[in-house]
Image: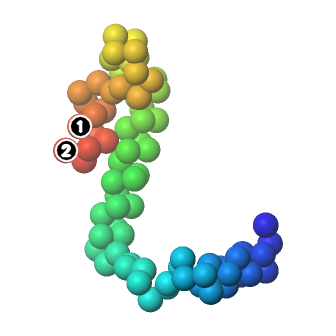
Amino acid sequence: MSKKDIEREAANLRRSGKLDPSRIVKESPEEELRALGQETRTERAFAAAAECAYCARERREKNDGTALCREHLAEAMGL
């Protein structure tokens, strides 16, 4: 999709009333920074969990491909 296609679709949405840019609430810089920090912690925890034997055991026992051991769960949660 080209930039012009995107601009055209955005204009169509504005005309249809389905998009009102004035109603979009932006996060504060502090909240954006907090969210970025959380995203980074989560990515780091899951990357380390891919090679963690305890995480592998949790995933196997719980039959959940996203399960983490206590250490990596705490890291992902920012604790």
* Nearest the eye: 42 or 14: 14
* Nearest the eye: 39 or 11: 11
Q: Measuring from the top left, give residue 39's x and y in whole percent.
A: 39, 53
Residues at marks 2 and 1 touching, judged by CB atoms closer than 8 Å: yes
What is the quadrant of the N terminus in the image?
A: bottom right
Residue 11 appears in the rendering = yes
Q: Amino acid at mark 1?
A: Ala
Residue drawn at point x = 41 percent, y = 84 percent = 23
SS at badge 2: loop
Residue drawn at point x = 78 percent, y = 75 percent = 5
Q: Quadrant of residue 11?
A: bottom right
Side (left or right) of 2 relative to 26? right
Q: Quadrant of residue 10?
A: bottom right
Residue drawn at point x = 40 percent, y = 21 percent = 64
Residue 29 appears in the rendering = no
Q: Which residue is mark 1?
A: 74
* Nearest the eye: 17 or 35: 17
Q: Measuring from the top left, give residue 20's x and y in whole percent.
A: 49, 84
The answer to whether residue 44 is above or below residue 33 is: above
Measured in 3D between alpha carbons, the distance from the residue under mark 2 to the one under mark 1, in whole angstroms, is 5 Å
Q: Measuring from the top left, give residue 3's x and y in whole percent.
A: 76, 77
Residue reaching furthest to the front: 16
Badge 2: how crowded within 10 Å, few (<14), some, or many (20+)?
few
The answer to whether residue 72 is above or below residue 42 is: above
Q: How many marks?
A: 2
Label at residue 79: 2
First along the sequence among labels 2 and 1: 1
Side (left or right) of 18 relative to 79? right
